[in-house]
Amino acid sequence: PPALPEPRGPRRVVEKEAIFDRTYSDWVDGDLLNIYAFNHTVLRNRTEGVRVSVNVLSDHKDLPVLFVVRQKEAVVSFQVPLILRGLYQRKYAYQEVSRTLCQPQTKVEVETQHFYVDVSTLSLNASYQLRVTRVENFVLRVCTGESSTGSGVPFSPQYFKYEFPEGVDSVIVKVTSAMAFPCSVISIQDILCPVYDLDNNVAFIGMYQTMTKKAAITVQKKDFPSNSFYVVVVVKTEDEVCGGALPYYPLSKHTSPDEPVDQHNRQKMLEVMVSPAITSEAYVSSMLFCLGIFLSFYIITLLIACWESCRQQKRKGLLAAMDSPSPDTGHARSIPSSFLGHAPYDSYGYGSFGECRMPSLTSLPAGAGGCAAMPTLPVLPENGSSGSTEAVTDSMGSAEVPYGYAGQDQFKRRIPSAPMRQLCIAMGERSLENVAGRPRLDSLSSVEEDDYDTLADIDYDKNVIRTKQYLCVADLARKDKRVLRKKYQIYFWNIATIAVFYALPVIQLVITYQTVVNVTGNQDICYYNFLCAHPLGNLSAFNNILSNLGYVLLGLLFLLIILQREINYNRALMRNDTHALECGIPKHFGLFYAMGTALMMEGLLSACYHVCPNYTNFQFDTSFMYMIAGLCMLKLYQKRHPDINASAYSAYACLAVVIFFSVVGVVFGKGNMVFWIIFSVIHIVATLLLSTQLYYMGRWKLDSGILRRIVHVLYTDCVRQCSGPMYVDRMVLLVMGNIINWSLAAYGLIVHPNDFASYLLAIGICNLLLYFAFYIIMKLRSGERIKLIPLLCIIGTSVVWGFALFFFFQGLSTWQKTPAESREHNRDCILLDFFDDHDIWHFLSSIAMFGSFLVLLTLDDDLDCIQRDKIYVF
């Protein structure tokens, strides 16, 4: 270390009168103390900034020059070279330093204040330059931009003052720059001395955020008792926190790791602008607008319900009139098919639909035992069959007799003939009348699905029925309605339980996040659109939370619609209505209740996510999206496969695995090749297993003999004889599904998308859209039709989804980048000066999801008068 100068007696003190805007070139050593005395006039209604700039010309890093500025109410001291630390305790030295002095308050109209600049050192001789100037545009005005050039550097921070005018309760401080780097920090501080304006202390008080090209902070008057604040601009020593690269840090044998590095001139030009924020009236009008939009759906639904009720009453009256004998002929009047709203379904014209009806007893082949011969499945475990030839559907052996009105084939009721009824009873089959005669709404406590699967011949029945080439809904709706009702109600109760246990810790966590943001002032924790973030109370972005109200209100409306439908259906069962008992798609409402609950929870958890959006909270916004996509696919499959749909436990277990991978992918998936390989393999294997399950209707078994059975099937169908697939339609769907899923897996493995949660959601949505398109095509191909209400819902929902996705992909912020880089995507509000593009996405997507649910609910209403043994399964 350099030797300190020997003291040569008392230190000399030289005091000099100094003036503004003059450069003083001088020197100082260990025996000399220079004092510069300045005075300036301070007006009570006018604030002027004073800036002290120094430049030490001597290179004595171990013996710096100390500058002390003594004011009326504050003391500011700094050394030159100024040493600032960066990441990994790197040191950066600056020979030029500029500091803005804190402005003392005055109570008189005019006051002359004095301040002193003391210069001292322990070195032998240090030369320096000193200059004191007034700051131009120190006080910011509303709606005007003030810029500073050439002084935005780490050793030369700047700050400006803003005073709230009368009638303005909140403002937005916007800072812009044409340069992304060097990285800078914008801080809002109260009028206190000293001002924290260095890289190592700017985060001590107030609110702050890092910046590349854009920064915006909403400031409320209630948070500053003096009705004014400082806007502090500091350029950081390194760019790593803003997403930039670390500077080269030279290390050699002749340099110490603690040796400071000179970064030369890190200069940034920027502009500061203050504009008034929205008023309280804008908050009220925006909330009323949001409520008005979604409450209008309640009004529209009520009007449609009233119209439908009047229409039904009119129809019942006409039917009653038609039942009465004609005074002229004494016979009942006939009803035209057009009045009933559909054409008679005499035949489908798709495939051999005669397979769906059992032939009469007299036309059965010899040795059939009263049941038609059906193909068996080659990929079955050898012990999975029995020799029973038991009847398997309620429609077997049914004689069709007219019911209701003349000329209406679709109103025929199937009543088992006496010989066939005796045969079915002898074989252990429950007759239709036994099923219909039981109370429909009695207790479910003693009914279990497993009670009907305890005999070996039940498995044989499944093999026979579910491997038919052409299946009807009656073939897959054989289980007792009470059993299935209980099975599908579990979906609702499970998701309600999941929602409670999931939402409570989420709410607690985001409240903690918001509290941390408010207490520390660190606005880099949350990724808002700061140019359109309107605070309310302790919430930083109330508009992003309010826009999620649509999910909750429309989800509740959907639950009310389902409740009304279930009440009407139960009333029909109580009066033994033939249409409810034997016609149409079997009505099970548990999955619909689960979908409505999931939509409400999506709104709640999306609101929680937007309390403080960041990568650790993103799973809150997507978890119930996965559930909605999965539940919609399950509901589509359940429509024509009610007996073999997945149970709630297995469905939610699979969704839990999806959410688990979502969390792991967000945390560890970025650029991790091992993770992507594992995920892609699991994705492909799961696709193959699900395809096999769907193709064989669950009649296969994963055991030690599966490979041998696969080889046997391939040898039989591809080598010995070149035969096509038995189930062509299913094969087409599954081949397309595998192509899409394998392509998505390859895309993920090659590209490694940064937003893994959205990638996973895209997989679910693609599969849902594929299955929905297949369902629509097969429905139309089978001779069925789409009624007016579901058709309008499909068209309207498609249009709304298109607009919603446009606003979704605007990308106003992204937690895949640093907070400073994310703010480069921020944009101003576009609706009522309150809502941004992402809020409109919330509005439109909630409406689109509600419309999608209505499509699923009403899609098969055209089949309500068609017997189930005439409805094709696909």
Image (cartoon, helix red, strand yellow):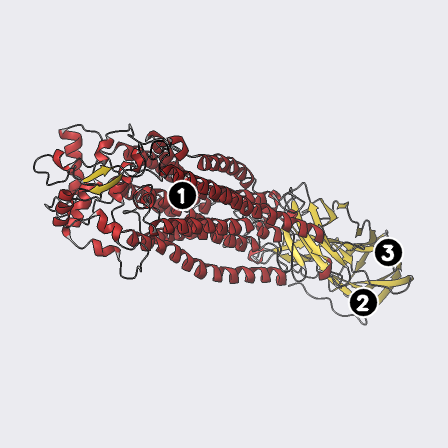
Find out whether the residues at labels 3 and 2 contact each other: C-beta distance under 8 Å: no
Q: Position of residue 228 (x, y in %)?
A: 77, 58
Disc assigned to residue 73: 2
Q: Residue 497's x, y, as percent?
A: 41, 60
From the image, tell me which residue sits under label 1.
Answer: 764
Q: Which mark is residue 404?
A: none
In this view, 177 is above or below 535: above
Whole-angstrom CA distance, mark 3 to mark 1, is 62 Å
**Which is more foreground, mark 2 or mark 1?**
1
Q: Which numbered disc, 3 or 2, marks the residue that appears first in the sequence?
A: 3
Label 2 crowd (10 A; few <14 / some 14-19 / many >=20):
few
Q: Which residue is mark 3?
A: 46
* Callout 2 amino acid: Glu
As measured in the structure, the alpha-carbon distance from the residue carrying label 3 to the one carrying label 2 is 18 Å
Q: Earlier in the sequence, mark 3 or mark 1?
A: 3
Residue placed most toward the observer, 37 or 475? 475
**Amino acid, disc 3:** Arg
* Local SS, label 2: loop
As shown in the figure, which amino acid type bears the numbered disc 1?
A: Gly
Q: Quadrant of the C terminus?
A: top left
Between label 3 and label 1, give the one nearer the viewer: 1
Please give the name of the residue rendered at 15% of the width and 30% of the height, measured from the top-left corner.
719
Number of numbered discs on residues: 3
Residue 528 visible in this rendered orientation of the protein: no
For marks 2 and 1 on the same chain, the one whose residue lies earlier in the sequence: 2
Does dot 3 land on a helix, a strand or a loop?
loop
Residue 746 at x, y = what percent? 37, 38
Asked which quadrant contains residue 519, the reply is bottom right
Provide residue 337's location: percent of width, then percent of height. 37, 31
The residue most toward the right is: 110
- Crowd tier of the residue under label 3, counting other residues whose Cα lies within 10 Å: few below 14, some 14–19, many 20 or above: few
Q: Nearer the viewer, residue 402 or 690?
A: 402
